[in-house]
Amino acid sequence: MPAPPDGPGRRRHLLYVAIGFPPAAKSSTYRLRETANQMCAAGWDVTVVTIARDSWELESGIDPSLLDRVDPRVEVIELPLRRADLETEIRLFPEARAADPMGWVKQLRERNKESFPEAAFGGWRAALERAVLGLHRARPVDLTLVTCTPYVTLCAARALWEKHRVPYAVDFRDGWSVDVVGSRTAFGPDSPEGRWEREVLDQALSLWVVNDPIAEHYRTRYPHLADRVKVVRNGYDVDSAPDAAGREPSGLPLTFGYLGLLSSPIGQLRALLDAWRLARSTEPLLAGARFEVRGHGGFGADRGGGAKIELLRRSEDVGVHFGGPVNKADVAGVYAGWDALVLLVLGGRYMTSGKVYEYMAAGLPIVSAHAGDHDASTVLEGHPLWTGACGLDRRKLADGFAHAARLAVGSGPAERLAAQAHARPFERSALMAAGAQDLTARMDRQTLLTGVPTP
Amino acid sequence: MTEILLIASARPELAVLTDAVGTLTSLGATVRLAAGFDLGEHRDALARTGCASLHQLPRTFHGRSSVVRREALRLGAGEQLWLRSAGDKDLRSLARDAHVLVALDADAVYTVWRLARRHRGAHAVFGLAPAVRAVRADATPPSALTRVRHGLPSPSVLTGDLRRGMRRLPGTVVRAATVRRVLRTSAGARLWRSVAALPALPDRVRAPLAREAAEGMRWAGRGGGAALTLLGAARRTSDAELRATLLEESARADIAAGRPPLALTEAVGGWLSLADARLGANDRREAATALHQALPLVFHRALHIDQLTTPMAQDAAAYTRPLLESQTLRTVAGTARGRAAAAAPAPTDRPLRLLVMTHGNANFLRLVLSHYEDRPDVELRFVDTMQHPELRRLARAHWRVIADRLDAATWYRERLERLLRPHLKWADTVFFDWCEGPVAMLTTIDPGTTRVVVRLHSYEAYTQWPLLVDFSRVDELLFIADHVRDLCTSYVPQLSSATAPRMRVVHNATDLSSFDRPKSDDARFTLGLVGLGQIAKDPLWALDVLERVRAYDERYRLVLVGDVVDPEKSGASRQYRDALEQRLAPLVRAGAVERRGRTDDVASALVGIGVILSSSVREGCHVAVLEGAASGAVPVVRDWPFYAGKANGARTTYPEDWVVSDPEEAAGRILRVTSSADRWRAEGAAASKHALSTWDWSVVRKDFDDVLLHGGQPLPGADRS
C-alpha cells in the first residue's frame, strides 16, 4: 500500500520529539529541521516537541534565522523545560545551591539519574511522557520519531508504545552505547543505560545513525536489529555553501577560519594554536595570516567565556580572532570571507561531525586536525583541496597549515568547483529525504503485513 | 548609567573579562569589581580590563571573634566569603548602587545570593554572558524611587533571615558559650558533657548541641572531652543511624587525640546492626554504606599500625568476632564467585606473558622486574594502577567493592571489565604485589584462564582488605613470613575455606651480596637501627638497650639511620615522636646516639655498624636485619611482641640465638658477642653466611620462578644451588 497522498484528512500524524529544534542554535538543529521538513514532504503531519526557546539561552543560544526554512505545516510544541543545572539566575537558587553550586548540581544529576540514566536530562522524563500522552489524546499519533541526544526522549516513545502501541523510530545520530569520542563501548548491556537501550531498540521500527562505523557497532551489538539500522548522514545545507564560481586564487594575507561549537578539550585547542604559531613563523605565505574562530563556547555561567575563549583571546598576537557565534543565514557569507578552513573535531572512527560536510561544500582548502582513522577522513577522501589528516602533532599540523596556504593561493575557480562537487552527494535535503522515505516505507510495510503497525 | 558589581573569589580570566567589560561599557554600564582574592599583584592587570573600580574584600578572619572563626571552619568556601564580607561597608554601598550583581565564580555565588535578597531591584546572575543579557534586557535603569523601594528587603526576606538567624541561634549561642576559656577548665567541659547527655532532649537538639560542644572542646585542646561528650550524647540518642554516627565521631575524636577510642566497640556494633537490618530489608546499597562506615573504624591505622600493641596481635579472631557475626560482613567476606575456567598451564610454545602489578609501591619489585625483563622465556608487562587515573580511583572505591559483593547494582564490575579485561586477556600470569584494595578490585571480575598470584607483606594483615578480596579468584597467595600467614588465616574466613588459594611463604627479593663489606674494629661498639619511620619500629626500645650496655661500657653508641616517625600521621605518632625526641636529646648531646637520617646507600651506612638491632613490635621479615646480618653485623632481634609466644614469629624467622625477649637480654647478648674482637668477627661472619645462604636473591629467585613461571610447581631437576 503506498503512502497516503498529500491532502486534507489523509495525512498521518508524526510526533517528532526533537529537543534542539530551531531556533536553538545547536549543531544538530539543521538535521532536526530537515528531518521535519522531509517527513512533511513524505506525507506526514508533523508535530515537533522541543523545549522552550528561552531555555537555550543557557546553552547554545538561539538563532531566529533558523526558523525561516521550517516547513510552515510543521507544528512546534515548546515544553516548559529548562536545564536546571545550567541556571544562571541566582534569585532562582535555593540557599543550598547558592552555598555550594557544584555540590548542588552534582546531587541534582544524581537525582535525575533516578528517573532515567542520563545525568543532565533524566529529570525531564515525567514531563515528556505526560506531554506526549496529552498530545496523543488531542490528536492520535501514528508514528513517534525521537532524536537523541538527549536520550531521555526515548521515554516519550516508550510511553506511547506501552500505553497505545504507537510505533516509533529512533534517530540515534551518534549512538548511545558507542563512545564516539573515546572510540569504544560506552556502557555494557547490564548497566541501566544498556537495559534501556536494548528495550527501546527491540521494538523500534527503525534506527538511524550518522555513519557506517556506528551502524556497524549497532549491527554487531544487536544482530537481530541489523536490517533496521539505517545510515542517514548529516550532510550540508545548500544555502550554507558560498558561491565558488569565479573565485580566484586567494591573495595575501590569508584568512583561515573555524566555524562550529568549540567542543574539543582545551588541550587540543592549545595544540592547534601552537601549531598555528609555528606555521605562521615558518611559512612565508602565512606571515601576517589571520585565524578567525567563530561559534559557541561554554554553557551556563561559562557561556561566551571560559578557558578556551581566554586561550583564543590570548593568541591574538599571532592573528587569532574569536568572533562569537554566526547566525545560520550568515554562514555562507562567513565562508566566502575565508581562504581556508580548519577542521578541529573530536573522536576517531565513530565520529564524522556535521561541519565536515559544510566545510567540503565551501570549496576551500581544509586543514584536518584529527586522527587519520576519523570518519571525517572517509568523507573527505578525494576532496581536491584537503591536506589530509594531520592529527594534533604540532609539526605535522604546522605543515598542514602551510599546505593549505599553498592550496589557497594556487587554486582557482576550477579547483574550488571540483571541491564543491565532491560535497554534492552529501546535500542534506537529499540525504534526509531518503531517510524519510525509508521510514515511511517501513511504516507502510508493517501496516500492510499485519494490519496494525508493529515493528 | 547602569551599575554592575562583579564579585569574584578567584582571579577571573583576564581576556574574557576585558571583552565582557568592554561590551557592558559600550551598553552604557559602569563595571566595578569586588575581589575575594588578593588584588595586590593583579591590580594593574585588572585595571586594564576597564573596570571603573576595584575593591578588596576581607581575605581573612583576622580580628574576628573566635566564635566566628570556629563557625567558618564548618562552612564551605562560598559561605566563608560571605561571612568575611557581610560586614564590609564598602561592599554594602557598592551593592546598594548596583543594578546587576554578578558572581564570576561558584564561590562568589553565595555572596551575590545574600546581597540579592537585600537588594530586590537588582538582577543577580552567575557569569558574564548572563550579565550582558541582563543589561540588554533592561535598557533603562529603574528610577530612583523604584530603587529605593526595591532597595529595601522584602518582608519575606526579613522573615527568611530571621528564620535563618533563629535556626542558627542555638549553634551560635552554644558556640559563644563554649569559647576556649570556658572549655579549658575541667568544670566547663564537664558541664557541657552533662548537658549533651541530659535525658529527654530530642535527637534533633541533642546531636547539634553535642557536636558544637565537642567542637569547642577540640578547639580548647580537650580532644578527650570531645570524645566523651559525643559518646554521652550517642548513648542517649534513639535514632540508630544518628547514634552510630555520633559514636563514630566520638571514636575518631579519641583517635585524633591519640587516645584509645572508648566508643569503638559500640560504634562498630551500631554500624553493623544497621547494615544487617538494611540487608534484611534487602536495601543492599545502604547496607553497603553502613558496613563501609564500620570497616575503616575496625581497622583504623592508629589502632594497629601506629601503635606498640594491637588487639589484633593478642587475638585477631576474638577482635574480629563482632565483625564476623554480622551477616553483612559474612556475605561480603564470604563472596567466593570462583572462576569459570581453571588457570591455564604455562605456555610451552611461546614466552610466558607475565603481568606484574602494584599500586604505587614497587619498592620490593625492583629485582623481580629486572630478573624477568631479561629472560627470553618471559614477556613482561608492568602496570602501576596508581599511574592510571581511572584505575587509581577505582582501586580506592571501598564502597563499590562492598556493594559489589552484596550484589547491589553498581557500574563497578562493568567498568573494571573494560579497564582490566585487556590486561587479563594478554597475561598468562598476573603477579599483584601488596594485598590491598587493588587486589579486591582485580578479583571483582573473573580472571579467565589467567593465573593470579598475590603477595601479602605484613601491614595488609591489619587492614580491611584481606576481608574484601575474593580469594577464590586467586591461585596463589604468597606471604613473606609464616607468622603473617598465621595471623591472616586466623580471621579471614576465605583463607580457611575450601576455596582458599594455595598459600606459601616466599622471602622478599633482596640483593644481599653487595652488603658483605669489611668492617673496622670500631664498629664492634656501634649498634645500628636502620629504619625508624613508624611507631612499630619502636626506637625507644633500642634506647633502653643502649642505656644498659653503656652502663657497662661507655664506648657503645647507637646509630639511627632513617627519618623518625611523622608526627602528622596521627595523635599517637605525635605523642611517640615527642617522647622519642625527649629521650634522644641528651643522648645525642653526649655523643651516645648519632642520627644519620634517611639514606639510599644502606650498604655503606652498615660498614660502621657492628650490631644490627631489630627493636620492632611487629615485622614481616625486617629487611634491615637481613641486610645488617649480610654485612657482618651481629643481629640482635627483639622477639616481636605482636607475635611473641605464638607458633611463628621472630624466633622461627631467624636463628634462635639472634632473638631476645627484652632489653636486658639484648644487652647481655651484645656484651657477650662483642666481648672480644675475634668473637664479634666470628659471630658476624656466621650471621653473614646464614643471611646470604637463606635470603639472598640468588636463592630466593628460584622460588619466584616456581611460582610465577611454573604454575606454582618446582621445575623438575631444576638447579636450586
Image (cartoon, coloured by chain):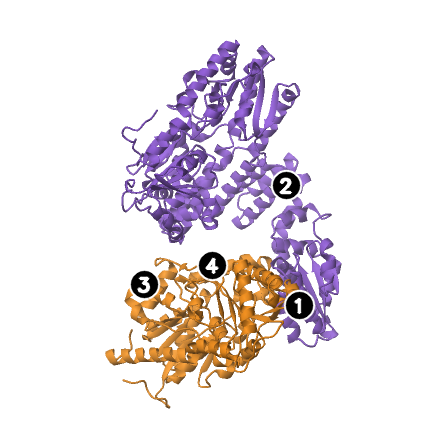
* 3D distance between C-alphas at marks 2 and 1: 45 Å
Left or right: B605 as drawn, with respect to A288: left
Q: Quadrant of residue B586?
A: top right
Mark 3 vs mark 4: tell me if same chain.
yes
* 3D distance between C-alphas at marks 3 and 1: 50 Å
How would you rate the neighbour count of disc 4 (Cα within 10 Å): few for under 14, some for 14-19, many for 20 or more? some
Compare residues B34 and B177 and report the one nearer the observer: B34
Left or right: B184 as drawn, with respect to A275: right
The chain coloured purple in the image:
B
Q: Amino acid at mark 2?
A: Trp
For disc 1, the marked residue is B20
Q: Residue B428's spot in the image, x, y percent? A: 33, 43
- At mark 2, the secondary structure is helix
Give me the disc on residue B219: 2
How would you rate the neighbour count of disc 2 (Cα within 10 Å): few for under 14, some for 14-19, many for 20 or more? some
Quarter placement of the C terminus of chain A: bottom left
Give the color of chain A as drawn.
orange
* 3D distance between C-alphas at marks 3 and 4: 31 Å
Compare residues A102 and B115 and report the one nearer the observer: A102
Q: Residue A39's spot in the image, x, y percent? A: 39, 81
Mark 2 vs mark 3: tell me if same chain.
no
Q: Amino acid at mark 1?
A: Ala
Q: Residue A14's spot in the image, x, y percent? A: 38, 80
Discs 4, 2 touching: Cβ within 8 Å: no
Tell me: residue B414, above or below residue A154: above
Of badges 2 and 3, nearer the viewer stands 3
Q: Amino acid at mark 4?
A: Glu
For disc 4, the marked residue is A110
Tell me: residue B563, above or below residue B636: below
Identify the mark nearer the N-term, 3 or 4: 4
* 3D distance between C-alphas at marks 4 and 2: 36 Å
Of badges 2 and 1, nearer the viewer stands 1
